[in-house]
Image (cartoon, rainbow, N blue to C red):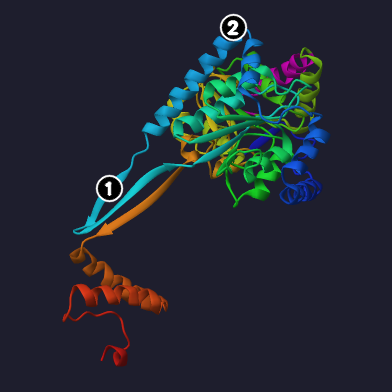
Amino acid sequence: MTRTYLKSTTGTTCADTSPVTATVRDMLAGIETGGEDRALQFARRLDGYDGPVLVSDDDRARAAAQVGQREKDDIRYAYDNIRRFAEAQRDAMHEVEIEIVPGLVAGQRMIPVRAAGCYVPGGRYAHVASAMMTVTTAKVAGVAHITACSPPREPGGIAPAVVYAAGLCGADRILAMGGVQAVAAMAHGFFGLPRADIIVGPGNQYVAEAKRLLFGQMGIDLLAGPTDSLILADAGADAAIVAADLVGQAEHGGNSPVWLVTDHQPLAEAVLAQVPRLIADLPDLNRCNAHAAWRDHAEVILCDSREEMAATSDDYAPEHLTVQANDLPWWLDRLQCYGSLFLGEETTVAFGDKASGPNHVLPTSGSARYTGGLSVHKYMKLVTWQRATRQGTRRVAEATARLSRLEGMEGHARTADIRLAKYFPGESFDLGLPQAAAE
């Protein structure tokens, strides 16, 4: 396979995370010992906020009053799309009951977790869409209690649009807290909240590390790194749109990789020429992020064929994968490793990030090789059950006894023996016993 790198990375995405791990581990230990008071101390120091930690109904109403009607309409439009897609995902799952052999019935149930914590990032941006993506999906899954939390951005608390969106989508409680302390508060059930069975949502490296260290005590959606995006484009692609899409994703942060894979060198060269100009035209903070991401983590790769392009994409396993190329059905059928796929010029990652419906909490750092993103399924436990008639136990008990003895697990075997002796008295069975024991 021949890949020509017209632009290569100059930075690395493998920074030493050990200081973060040590810091987060110490914080979690302190909060577990010190409880709510210690969480509040971190909140005051790190969030710079000393207001009420739980958003009241009156606070929700005040936040809603600060959101303009057009913004409310846009939030409602996005919420409806996200909800409809989540409902379709839920309806694609089914409970199962099957008679495996006569007299032996087994089944599958779908049970939502009891409590979910939805982390909504703060910091540079007010992530309204993250509130909708996480809370809506949990609500559709049937989660009984949903907590949304987000860092307060000012003395007044969480951004009003985030509060409004979380409430609209079904959050039972809203926690004005961010970072490690918020994850720990939801995990331990502080401030009158139920202990979260699962915590979901994107966050910075400290939030991600807190989720990783607490995983096992609770479930998580996935371990997220910096967001990344890859575009597959052929000779028919519009260089201006390709460049704009790359820049749009690069503004997430200076460590966010963006990649262009193409089989058409003139397109690649046109994109390379346009991207710096588009970055220069961004507002200050966005420009700084996009410039660093493009300089240090962007790649432009020239391939010999569309099959080579597809193979390259699968090797990268991007979080977001855009195809701006001919024969979209071929690409849909061929591509295997991605978090979310955007087919054709008419859609873009930003649509998925904000309003089109499929979830934007997606696997990063190549983890799309083995997992998908947040969905209704993440909030559901697929559990199994079985029952049998006495006649139905006959064959399975014989097989179980012999297999257990083959493995050396005599106690397991005897649980089958005792049933056969009770249900079929006087009958003889070959249960894999040593000859002396059998006699």
Q: Residue at x 20, y 59 (%)?
A: 103
Depth check, front residue: 216 or 311: 216
Q: Vertically, is 423 above or below 189?
A: below
* Quarter-of-image position of residue 153: top right
Q: Amino acid at mark 1?
A: Glu
Q: Residue at x 30, y 73 (%)?
A: 416
Q: Residue at x 53, y 40 (%)?
A: 115
Q: Is residue 270 magenta?
A: yes
Which quadrant of the figure contains the N terminus?
Answer: top right
Going from the N terminus, do you reach mark 2 or mark 1 first? 2
Q: Which residue is mark 2?
A: 69
Q: Which residue is mark 1?
A: 97
Q: Position of residue 49 (x, y in %)?
A: 79, 28
Q: Position of residue 403 (x, y in %)?
A: 35, 73
Stretch of the chain drawn in magenta: 260-280
Q: Position of residue 260 (x, y in %)?
A: 65, 28
Q: Is residue 142 left or right of residue 39?
A: left
Q: Amino acid at mark 2?
A: Gln
